[in-house]
Amino acid sequence: MRRFVAAGFTLVAALALTAAPAQAQFFVGAGLVSPSGDFADGFKAGLGASAGVAVFKSGDERFKVWAEGLFARNDLDISVLDGSSTMMGAFGSATLDLAAGGGAIPYIVGGAGYLSQKIEIEGESETEGGLALFGGGGVSFGKLWLEARYTTASIADGTTAFLAAMVGYSF
């Protein structure tokens, strides 16, 4: 599983390097990761970070395709046990601005990729991974943006789902 995650991050880095010349656009963001469904039964809200690079922009730059990575950590929500969930993912995504120019520009985002989840409880750990899909929306204010996205991943015999609310910067 670690090889898949390493390969995913290598792909994101390679795409970043090939897109870097000329007018590359990057982003970084961080925020709250709130578990949903079965994942919420055992874990608290945690923190996450993401970063990516635009690998394609339409002529008017309202549609973009991104290569991105995600890191998130949530602590176990059971007071008698010590544990956490650490997630890393590599995704391809697309954004579409719903307005042109101006101040606040709303947009929609969706994507797919691979999510690896390491669950550690009382020193014992297990890492699994699988296909992940996400969708959401946000609003950009020039280079700053606010975004919420819902991610669901089929990992092992279950589903890991969470809502991520992030603030970020594009450059």
Image: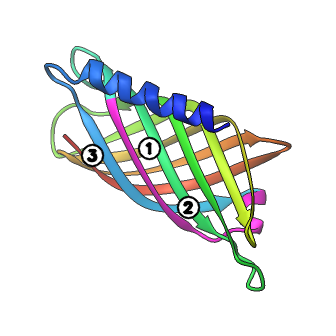
Q: CA distance from mark 2 to mark 1?
A: 22 Å
Residue 133, image x, y percentages: 61, 35
The type of residue carrying mark 3 is Ser
Q: Which residues are magenta?
A: 38-53
Crowding at mark 1 (Cα within 10 Å: few <14, some 14-19, many 20+): some
Q: Could you say where residue 127 lies in the image, as x and y percent from the top left?
A: 71, 48
Image quadrant holding the N terminus, namely: top right
**Residue 101 sits above or below residue 77 on the image:** above
As measured in the structure, the alpha-carbon distance from the residue carrying label 3 to the one carrying label 2 is 25 Å
Q: Which residue is mark 2?
A: 73
Q: Quadrant of residue 83?
A: bottom right
Q: Which numbered disc flags the more N-terminal residue, 3 or 2?
A: 2
- Judge whether residue 43 is colored magenta: yes
In front here: 109 or 2? Answer: 2
Where is 37 relative to 111, above or below?
Answer: below
* Applied colour scheme: rainbow
Give the structural element (helix, strand or loop) at label 1. strand
Q: Which residue is under mark 3? A: 140
Q: Residue extending furthest right?
A: 157
Badge 2 or badge 1: first in the primary sequence: 2
Q: Could you tell me which residue is drawn at 60 percent across and 65 percent down?
A: 74
Which residue position holds label 1? 137
Can residue 89 be seen from the camera position used here?
yes
Q: Residues within 10 Å of mark 3 (few under 14, many from 20)?
A: some
